[in-house]
Amino acid sequence: MSRDFSPFGLLHALVVVAAVVLWALLIRAAAARGSADRSRLVIPLAVSILVANLFWFFHRLEPERYSPSSSWPFQLCDLAWMVAAWSLLQHDRDDCPAHQLIFFWGLGLSSQAFLTPTLGRGPALPRFWFFWLAHWQIVAAGLLNLVVYGRRPTWRGFRLAATATVVCGLIMTAVNLRFDTPYFFTSAGEPENPTIIDQLGPWPLRLVWLGLLVLAWFAALRLLFGRRRAREGKGGVQG
């Protein structure tokens, strides 16, 4: 089994197709259940997110695997899986801010891992499987909120996600400069595989373009997916 992974190849396509099929099956199963019975599906998913990601976190802390550049939980997806679990555990509360965050961080940003994965290792190594599992879980939480629970992004949610993203980005930039780490896509180095960020010019100016691009993407998602809720007048926190 290959130890290397190349984006946009056959293996990448198979992973994306498998992810889409599993999302569809999850949504269908959740939509077919009543609100009380749905908890028996959603809560175990939340627990699985916590268990899987905590296991991987401590796995990376073992001395033979520990590295400041990869073992600290400072990537966007690390924050996103925490928000995903929080959102699912609070699935019966429309006013939980995690529902808004997981829309923007999950469907808006973490989903990009399936398009341009920063992954260089193949299925022979555990990181390959965990990379896809973690991002699948994050996007699944966002899809459940959007499709099954009918929640829509709000401008209040946009402000929350924008503020949290910018603040975390600034903090992670300081961490990267201090420890020469690659977290939150704000480091001066290059990712393991190319992404759209590589087209934004040299560091540090590309951080400005990256921030503007993320904010514009958040605004576009709010305009695109917020309309239905505005017509229906239901789901989530109004704003």
Image (tube, helix red, strand yellow):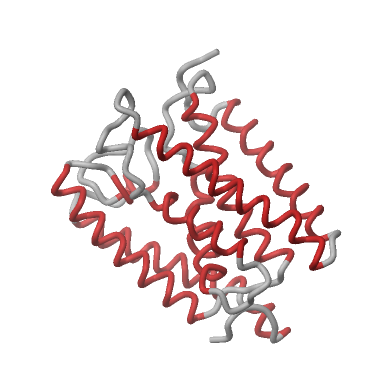
Using residue 186 as the reference point, say whether residue 80 is left or right of it.
Answer: right
Q: Report the front residue among 125 and 214.
A: 125
At a point 24% along the width and 61% down the height, the residue shown is 170
Using residue 220 as the reference point, say whether residue 195 is left or right of it.
Answer: left
Above or below: residue 67 compared with residue 85: above
Which percent across, then down, holds residue 162?
Answer: 39, 70
**Residue at the outermost top position:** 1
At a point 54% along the width and 31% down the height, the residue shown is 129
Using residue 233 as the reference point, say whether residue 60 is left or right of it.
Answer: left
Q: Report the front residue among 131 and 6.
A: 131
Above or below: residue 167 compared with residue 43: below
Quadrant of image for the N terminus: top right
Q: Quadrant of residue 79?
A: bottom left
Q: Report the front residue among 70 and 220.
A: 70
At a point 39% along the width and 47% down the height, the residue shown is 196
At a point 74% along the width and 54% down the height, the residue shown is 41
Which percent across, then down, holds residue 26?
Answer: 74, 50
Using residue 224 as the reference point, say whether residue 216 is left or right of it.
Answer: left
Give the number of callouts: 0
Which percent across, then down, holds residue 82?
Answer: 48, 56
Above or below: residue 146 compared with residue 174: below
Which percent across, then down, holds residue 190?
Answer: 27, 38
